[in-house]
Image: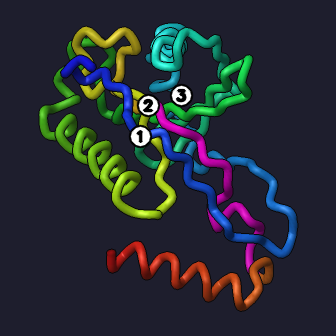
Amino acid sequence: MRQTSFRVSSSTSVCQSSFRMTQRSIFHWQGQHNDKRSARTFNHIDWTALLKEAQILNGGRSCVFDRPYHAGGRHIVRRLEFINRGQLWLVRIPILPASLASGQDEILKWWTAEQRFTMESKIATMKFYAESTDIPVPTIFGHRTFIDGNPVKLPYMLMQCIKGNMLFDLGGPGILTSEQKRRIRKSIALIQVW
């Protein structure tokens, strides 16, 4: 394995949640902050290069993007599907700031060594939790934490897609039973005190 920022995870475990809902859970995303910043970021990325990177990491298997993208406050996320296996991965990319002028030189200045370190720290933390605990953490398949020389043009993480919904996606009050609420609180407490 090369010692570069383009790494393949040695962890292959898949974590499954045993949490059951009173109604059937439908896997969907609610992009909460799709705005001009996320659209600008989306348009800056070389998505063809990203597909090629994912194919290399997954043994040359063909993949396509499943739907456009979703944005949070700091990242856009896009789902990839490997055609022959039905395997789903996610790509997570930081959103460019609104104040940033166009041009690759400005983007290079924006992505500081501190931001790169923070991203690498998050990746290392996710790998540590996946290998050392039973907390469901997506497997990291590959990443690039730099911009200069990156064919995708922005830093990214390629990771396992664990199907599930966030609590706010479930439809509001009255959906969860008292027992489910208790189990959620216990799960969150265990994560926080670990």
| Residue at the far right in the pictured view | 23
Q: Residue 72 in the image: x percent, y percent?
A: 51, 47
Q: Residue at x 55, y 34 (%)?
A: 90
Please, what secondary structure does the residue beneath circle 3 have? Answer: helix
Q: Would residue 107 be visible to someone looking at this image?
A: no
Q: Quadrant of residue 124?
A: top left
Q: Which residue is label 2 attached to? A: 141
**Magenta stretch, residue numbers:** 158-173
Mark 1 highlights which residue?
11
Label pair 3/2, CB-CB below 8 angstroms: no
Label 3 amino acid?
Ala
Residue 84 coordinates in the image, percent (x, y): 73, 18
- Sequence-first tag of 3 and 2: 3
Q: Quadrant of the N terminus?
A: top left
Which numbered dot is residue 180?
Answer: none
23 left or right of 140 in image: right
In percent of width and height, residue 26 lies at 81, 54
Separation of residues labelled 3 and 2 (CA atoms): 25 Å
Query: Alpha carbon of mark 3 to alpha carbon of mark 1: how far?
Result: 33 Å
**Where is the C terminus found, in terms of image quarters?**
bottom left
Foreground pick, 4 / 67: 4
Q: Mark 3 or 1 closer to N-term?
A: 1
* Residue 34 is one of the magenta-drawn residues: no
Q: In the figure, 22 relative to 153: above or below? A: below
Q: Which residue is mark 3?
A: 39
Mark 2 or mark 1, earlier in chain: 1
